[in-house]
Image (cartoon, rainbow, N blue to C red):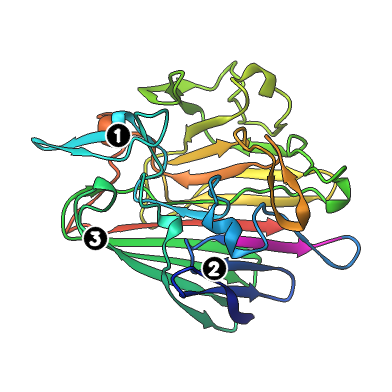
Amino acid sequence: MKVKKRTFGVLASGQKVSIYTISNDEMSFSAIDYGCCITSILLPSKSGGFDDVTLGYSTLDGYIHNTPHFGSLIGRYAGRIKNAEFALGARKYLLTPNAEGKHCLHGGYPSYDKEIWNSKYFCHSHEAGVCFDRISPDGEQGFPGKLTLTVTYTLTCDNEIIIRYEAFSTRTSPINLTNHTYFNLNPPGMRADGRYVLALNHELQIFSDLYVETDKELLPTGNFVSVEGTPYDFRNPKLLRTDIERTNGGYDGTWFIGPPKKDQKMLAAIIREPMSKREISVFSTQPGLTMYTANFLKGEIGKNGDAYNPQSAVCLESQHLPDSPNQANFPPAIVTPDIPYRHETSWLFKF
């Protein structure tokens, strides 16, 4: 196991941004302390080198203007919260209406991926990684409670990336942390005309019978719907392209994996790319899996000058369910002074 640290760039304030590269004998990943962004995951290629299987940027400036949240840590609450508000007891809390001008998406502002986090790395014989931490002040983004946050990215000798989230709060507050990495497992030789090849040839299996019903604004109705007979049925492996035309412009939904489990990860999904034979198994203690086929990309220019167009990647975001603070029948997504928030997600790579 190896860890390398170097300067990735400098903010206008003069603060240096560090990048950590964590590697074992077969693969590696890199992450920066600006937004805890995962900037690359390198897997072996058939030519003997390595391919980056994530979307992102080569420079700090890209992440400063990172509207799609490539590789970002998302919080304090991932997903949408209806009307940018929620109530705890008799008190109503108002958030940033940054989605459709009236709902809150991914916590609103200031965004967790636009902050410098404290960081330190560790390296052992069987695993290595980097630990990020910061304090989210009481009232930040409109949420109650001073939140002490720790996010740890670990690579094991078994080619598994483990993400551990931990938070302590001085007050009861909704919380829902996730990572927004965009995956494309295709070999780079499949790119054409400077445009990133679509990810619709990926084969996906989601271990769920139910998905969260949403309205036209992608807000949960509060109902769970059977995947039977719908384009959201991934109980058996199928290509992303198979039923995507039956959706409203691509996949952007949440599947119910099971009740949250603090100490036991559930197998949520397996995604494969048939040509390269690359595969990721997603395990998590979180109750939901949001799958997003990058429908809102607009040709952003990323690494290697590639243009990232709609559906050129897939996100598999283990998290609590969207709008849980306003949905009585969803599992609670709450941190209290007595009950810390702890969850874990892992990506097991095969190639």
**SS assignment at label 2:** strand
Q: Position of residue 302 (x, y in %)?
A: 69, 52
Amino acid type for the residue under numbered disc 1 = Ala
Q: Position of residue 55 (x, y in %)?
A: 67, 52
Amino acid type for the residue under numbered disc 3 = Pro
**SS assignment at label 1:** helix
At horizontal 51% and vertical 45% (from top left) the residue drawn is 317
Amino acid type for the residue under numbered disc 2 = Ile
Quadrant holding the C terminus? bottom right
Please give the residue where the numbered disc 2 appears in the rendered image: 32
Please give the residue where the numbered disc 3 appears in the rendered image: 137
Q: Where 120 sits versus 266, above or below?
A: below
- Which portion, as a residue range, is magenta? 39-45
Of the numbered discs 1 and 2, the one sitting upstream in the chain is: 2
Separation of residues labelled 2 and 3 (CA atoms): 22 Å
**SS assignment at label 3:** loop
Residues tagged 2 and 3 counted as in contact (Cβ below 8 A): no
Separation of residues labelled 1 and 2 (CA atoms): 29 Å
- Which mark, residue 84? 1
